[in-house]
Image: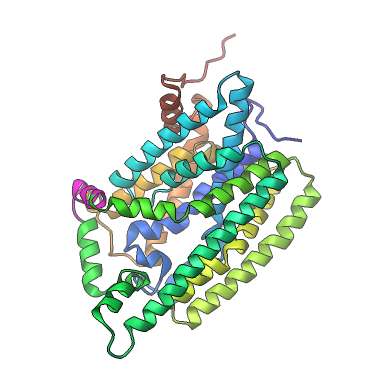
Amino acid sequence: MTTTSSSSDRIFSLDAIRGVAVMGIFSVNVIAFAMIEAAYFNPAAYGGHRGIDLFVWAANMLVIDGKMRTLFSMLFGASMLLVVDRAEQAGLSAAAVHNRRMAVLLMIGCLHYFLLWFGDILVLYALSGMIAYAARDKSPRALVARGLFLTVLHMTLFGFFFAQQAGADQAAHAAGATARAIDEWNGGLGSFYPSASMLAEDKALYLSGFWAIAAAKLSDWQNMITSNLVFLPDTVGLMMFGMAGYKSGFLTGQWDDRRYRLLAGALIPLGLAAFAGLVWTDVTTHFYVVAMMVGFVVVATPFITLQALGYASLIILLTRGRGWLAQRVAAAGRCAFSNYLGTSAIATFVFYGWGLGRYGSVSRAEAWLLVPCVWALMLLWSKPWLERYRYGPMEWVWRSLSRGSLQPMRKAVATA
């Protein structure tokens, strides 16, 4: 049966999976907060790639990287259908409700990108949600088919790009390479091998003031548009998988435990094996960036999705009993919007110059020490907050702006 909360019509499994996803995402995002962006993809670029630093990178690659974003994207698609269904049941225009929500999310995402962190995902979700809505009436089978098509399209487009970059690498490093060839490589994947001057320039920027950082991102606004557009096929496809998971009952916990055990037992080891091969390839090629990107963005894409589906199955099984930890994780999932933006506020304060100024001065493992602290904070505040209030703080802002009026926030107090 569908696992709904005893105190509301929320679906517990969706909240629990979302809670794990938002916690996991910060585990990999913390590197992009703490040091030059290239280090996120290439551990040899900065932050250390030996000893404990190599272990942190490999563990994140095996268990978390890509998989949590995939879960988050699928959950967005599932939640989108949930909102649409409830709007129609209330006699409202589903299209109007959905489009207002996406418009507000787009606005918040732009503010998040320019004022806090360049790694924003909200703009991409708003744009992808607008597109995915067109398939809301399709059957689960049709949604999976469309998702597979978009996944293949994503892999194909990036495959062509990386092939071009491999050629650019050869041309830039050939005898008598032209200045144009060198610039083409350095403007592409060659930027993932930052020079000392690039590292110094990047560190100086993020150790400067709040408005100086925001101004730098505003001056490079084209990058935000490009980085979101190129990932639209993949993200829309994942949302369609999530919509299929919602309609089929998979993500809402309606399948029997045997099917979830079979999926978790098969898909998680498959994903781990694939990523073990990827880690081995990256290490043995000395983190050659073309091979790394082809492996992670193209070859590993289907394995990322399958491993994420295995995780979803395992999370549903582990949270069936709704123990104290499951309730805490689900509460973090109900406040996922607030927790996601909260991690940006905390991490930028810790690392950027307008806060504690630790940017570019910690190793990969040292940066990761912030992760369990933030996880604990998510688990500590979310449940007590929801015992008093209907929504998380940013969830309330999103809902109020989408509906054009302040929504009731505090829960009614029971009286004798």
Q: Position of residue 274 (x, y in %)?
A: 62, 70
Mostly what secondary structure, the magenta segment?
helix
- At x 44% / y 56%, what residue is drawn? 230
Q: Which residues are magenta?
A: 208-218
- Outermost residue to the bottom: 175
Q: Would you say 117 lies left or right of 285 here?
A: left
Answer whether residue 90 is magenta in the image. Answer: no
Residue 402 or residue 221, whichever sits in front: 221
Which residue is drawn at the image coordinates 49% and 37% (left, top)?
335
Please identify the quarter of the rendering in which residue 364 is found.
bottom left
Is residue 214 one of those drawn in magenta?
Answer: yes
Q: Is residue 162 left or right of residue 311?
A: left
Q: Is residue 232 above or below residue 278?
A: above
- Inspect this view and state whether residue 291 appears: yes
Q: Looking at the image, which is closer to me, 154 or 13?
A: 154
**Residue nearer the viewer, 101 or 183:** 183
The N terminus sits in image quarter: top right
Q: Position of residue 267 (x, y in %)?
A: 69, 61
